[in-house]
Every structure is written in C-alpha cells, then in structure tokens.
Amino acid sequence: MRSFEQKKTQVDDIDRSMYDFKDKVNASFEVKSGLTPEIVNQISVEKNDPEWMRLFRLKSLKIYNEMPLPSWGPPLDGLDIGHIVTYVRPNTEMRSKWSDVPDDIKNTFERLGIPQAERLSLAGVGAQYDSEVVYHNVRAEVAAQGVVYTDIESAMHGKYAEMVRKHFMKLVPPTDHKFAALHGAVWSGGSFVYVPPGVSVTIPLQSYFRLNAPGAGQFEHTLIIVDKGAYLHFIEGCSAPKYNVANLHAGCVELFVGENARMRYSTIENWSKNMYNLNTKRARVEKGGAIEWVSGSFGSNTSCLYPMSVLQGEGARAEFTGITFAGKGQNLDNGAKVLHLAPHTSSRVSTKSISKGGGCCTYRSSVVIAPQADHCKSSVSCESLMLDSESRSDTIPVMDIRNDEADVGHEAKIGRISDTAIFYLMSRGLSEDDARSIIVSGFAEPISRELPMEYAVEMNNLIKLEMSGSIG
C-alpha cells in the first residue's frame, strides 16, 4: 500500500515550448544599443514623426535621464539600458492581407494561433513583430459602424492625427515614472481604436505583440477611446522566445472610457524568463462608465504591472480580476490601482497568485478615495497559493481614504495546498495528479471564466496543471 505521508505535493513549471521557438533575426534596420539623443532622433526620423512628436521624444529622454530608478519593488540589477536595442524594424511593411505577410513572420503567428483566432472569434487583429506592426485588419461590418482600428502611426498621420495628439500620454505622462519616460522617448508600434457614441462592438478586437530579437526592447503604445454609451472588448496577447540576455518590455496602454460607456481589457502575457516587463496601463472613466480589467501574467523574469483606473465621473465603476503564476527565477510584482475622484463610484479588485520552485509573487495595490468622492465603495481581495516551502508570496495593500462616507474593505489569504484536501480526494478514488489538478484548477477558475473560451483554454494551458508526487 502506498504511504501518503512520504509523497510531496509538486506542480510542474509552465510549458513554454510553443512560445520559445526563435526566428532568425532578419531586421531591415535597427539602432545601436543604448539610449542617447542621437538614437532617439534616429528613431524619430525612421518613423517619420511629426515635429511635435520628435520634440516630445527628446523631452521624455531628458526626464528619463533625470529620474532615479524606483526605490521599491523587485530589483532591476540585471537590466542595463546601455545594452538594450530600442528599435528593430522587421523586413516588411504593414499588411492588411495575411497572405502578404512574409513567410517567416507569418509562420510565427500561425504557430501562435493568431490567424485562426481572427477567423473564428475576433472582429479585428493587429500583430506586432519587434518594433513595428506587420499586420492589421478589421472586419468590414465593424468598420461600417464607424469603428476605427489601426496602427497608431497611421492614425497619427491621418484624419485622426489631432485626436492622437490630444490624448497621447496624457493619462500616463513621461513624468509618471522612469520607464514611462523611457517609453515616451523610444515608443514604436501599437494600436489606435476609436468606438463612436452608442456603438457596441460585440466581437473582441485583439493585438498580439511578439518580440523576437535578442537584447531588444518593445515599446508599443495602445490608445483606445470608447465614446459615450459605446462598448468594446479588447484583448492583448504577448510572448517572446528565451535568450541568455535581458529583453525589456515597457509598453503603455491608455484607455478613455466615455460617459455611460463600458470597456473590457483582457491580457494574456507569457513573456520569456529573460524579460523585464515594466508596462504601464491606465484608464480614465467618465460619468456612469465602466472599465473591466482581466489579466493573466505567466511569464517574464521580473514584472512590475499595476493597471490603474481613474474614476473621474459620478457613478463610474472599475473591476480588476487577475492571476499570476511565478516559477523558478521569477519575481512578479503585480497588482492594481484605483483612484476615486467622484461620488458614488465603485471598484472591485480580485487577484490570485500561484508560486512554486522559489518563485516570488507580490500583490501591490493602491486605493485612493478623494475628499469629494462621497458614498464610494471599494472591495479588495487577494489570494495566494504557495506550492512548496521555497516560494514566497507578499501582499502590500495601500488604502488612502479621505472621505468618512466611503465603504472600503480588504481581504487577503495566503496558504498552501491542503494535505487533508488531497488525502480526501484520493480517498474518494481520484489519482494524486487529478486531486492536485482539481484543487489548483478550482483556485484559478474565477479568473479563467472571465475570459472568452479560447483564451481561457490558453490560460489553462499556460498554467499546465500537471502534478507529480503527493502529500508529505
């Protein structure tokens, strides 16, 4: 008879084989590594920036050079901007037909399932490879509703140029933090979306970002404006192969949600374990509007990601639902921020984390209730599951409440897989692997059910709940 007490509960690391394949680097142009005014000017020339953008880049560079690194959060010792190539242009122009994309790049996205997802379940797709968007398309029936979905550079030079200039890095100014300033200096690629008043985009739009070049950075900018009474679900996916040198992702997402509008922003992130993911995401929500964040974070060596909701108008709402999986060598510092600026606003933050093999998950949040924000409600819940004695999980919530009529709650739970639960399930006839799988799947299920079916499947594949061993 098997002795339950002599076995040990374990969970395998995420299987990254479908993401770690590499293409031969075939760039048509790249800048030298490092960050200088000459490099920033060179990027601006290569991208044919308007003069205001060139000056904006140089101003951002100046801010970057003057700002210190954050004094909190995970260590960034392995990141040396002097060895990062900030702009790599692939050997192709942007295409609107999938058949026109070069075979090597097309094969990469085929292996990631992007064209199939577009055919089956998406209203439009953008695909970025290194520093430039290589494919962008939107369904004719969606475009006929007046919805604009294009790469941000095309929008900046076309009929929406003034709209881009009015909103670009207004929610996330370069002065926000050092890596926002870096983004302002060297940003390239990304998407622009405008949904007209009253229009409901019932099928999601998706942008997928693939960084292939070793030692490079990706700095895409996503700008989305959902006008009064409109609705949009936007999905962001990202991955990269693993190299022995550091890569950097410092993108920026700015979401403007109009009066009585609603937006859902879903992310499945599986960067390689040599990646520093220092992304910034922020939404501003007007009267009666709503923003919903759904986030799955499974990759990168080091991550600092805290999507922020600014509840600007009365009755605005925000929800954040996220899961993080940290394995060996990973330090993932994630969370959410909410700023209540108007009466009767409400927010709900719900996060889960899984750590194993010495991985470190940190939940970091900030909820601010302004003095004028009467009758606000905010609920924060974070749960952590550690799968061995080597791993670590920390919770660092901040509540800044400046109104006596606010209703704010916070709940945190940290624990390990229960030996008793596994023993019980095995006593009911389940195998050891099935018992562990049920427990961890149940822990992750509230997050996966918030995703569309095909992305919930991808998330579950990323978690890869394969077990070995049992109790001990």
Image (cartoon, helix red, strand yellow):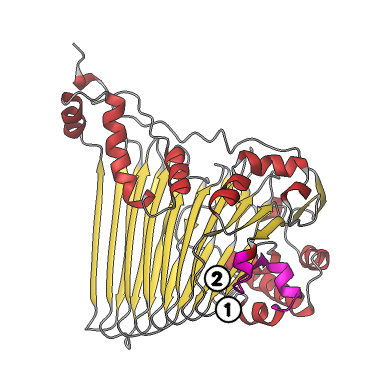
Answer with the quarter of the image where residue 359 lies.
Answer: top left
Residue at screen point 42% across, 82% down: 312
Residue type of the residue flagged with mark 2: Glu
User: Which callout, 2 or 1, points to the residue nearer the camera?
Assistant: 2
Question: Is residue 151 magenta-colored?
Answer: yes
Q: Position of residue 270 (x, y in %)?
A: 52, 46
Q: In this rendering, is residue 359 above or below 378?
A: above
Q: Position of residue 397 (x, y in %)?
A: 32, 63
> Tags 2 and 1 in contact by the CB under 8 Å rule?
yes
Does residue 23 appear in this view? Answer: yes
Q: Position of residue 386 (x, y in %)?
A: 31, 41
Residue at screen point 67% across, 54% down: 128
Sequence-wise, the earlier of marks 2 and 1 is 1
Residue at screen point 67% across, 80% down: 165
Residue at screen point 65% across, 48% down: 211
Question: Is residue 412 magenta-colored?
Answer: no
As rendered, which of 65 and 356 lies closer to the eye?
356
Q: Quadrant of the C terminus?
A: top left
Q: In this rendering, is residue 247 above or below 69?
A: above
Please indicate whether residue 133 sits to the left or right of residue 358 in the image: right
Q: Position of residue 426 (x, y in %)?
A: 20, 25
Query: Residue 240 shows which numbered tag?
Result: none
- The part of the chain drawn in magenta is 141-160
The residue tagged with tag 2: helix, strand or loop? strand
Residue, far top: 1
The residue to which callout 2 is attached is 254
The residue to which callout 1 is attached is 170
As rendered, which of 323 and 301 lies closer to the eye?
323
Residue type of the residue flagged with mark 1: Lys
